[in-house]
Amino acid sequence: MKKDLVAYFSASGVTAGLAKRLASAIGADVYEIRPAEPYTERDLDWTDPASRSSIEMKDKCYRPPIIDTDLPDAESYDRIFVGFPIWWYVAPTVVNTFLESLDLNGKTVIPFATSGSSGMGDTVKELIPSCKGAAVTSGKRFSARASDAELAEWAKGLETHIN
């Protein structure tokens, strides 16, 4: 039997709600990716080129520090679902920090995102280098209102697409 982890970064709570419902729907463990310095509303102002998120997202190599004292043991999981809001058509770089902190060799990483209107963009392409040794699926964007049934059906459908 596969053991799953749903790890998520949520700046405003939207992704947190979706991630927790996904975990409940598929019987997975849950882990919150927490930046060492939490994002403020001002940090998240994407219209301000001097905001923290704008500056971080301009530098694809930047890895915001995370609170890593309670990182999950990736060895315990077969699949790791990774959720986040879409920022600039990709995952926030704090997600890369998390992925690079784990030994993902032989795991399957399944990205999922929340966004009001943006698609997945280059998300998977940008995450693959952070997932050394893992298979990475194409992922999916959900609205915050995705139903539990939709989440469960999506996760179930992945069984037929993963090596």
Image: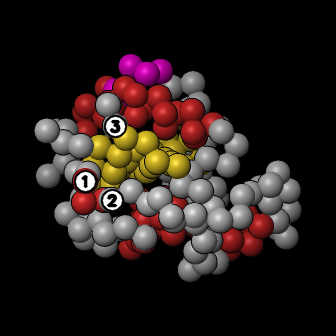
* Closest to the observer, 95 or 91: 95
27 on left or right of 123: left
Pointers 2 and 1 in contact (CB under 8 A)?
yes
Give the vertical position of 144 relative to 43 (above or below).
above
- Find disc 2 in the rendering and name its residue: 73
* Closest to the observer, 100 or 87: 100
**Label 3 crowding class (10 Å Cα cut-off): few <14, some 14-19, many 20+?**
many
What amino acid type is highlighted by mark number 2? Answer: Asp
Is 143 one of the magenta-colored residues? Answer: no
Q: Which of pointers 2 and 3 indicates the residue nearer the eye?
A: 2
The quadrant where residue 24 appears: top left
- Find disc 1 in the rendering and name its residue: 76
> Which residue: 82% across, 51% down?
41
Q: Secondary structure at mark 2?
A: loop
Magenta part of the protein: which range? 147-152
Please provide percent x and percent y for residue 19.
49, 37
Pointers 3 and 1 in contact (CB under 8 A)?
no
> Which residue: 35% across, 46% down?
5
Quadrant of the drawing holding the N terminus: top left
Q: Is residue 25 visible?
A: yes
Q: CA distance from mark 2 to mark 1?
A: 6 Å
> Which residue: 40% across, 34% down?
23
What amino acid type is highlighted by mark number 1? Answer: Ser
Q: Secondary structure at mark 3?
A: loop
Q: Which of disc 3 and disc 2 is earlier in sequence?
A: 3
**Outermost residue toward the front?**
69
Is 150 one of the magenta-colored residues? Answer: yes
Q: Which of disc 1 and disc 3 is earlier in sequence?
A: 3
Q: CA distance from mark 3 to mark 1?
A: 12 Å
119 on left or right of 103: right
- Find disc 3 in the rendering and name its residue: 28
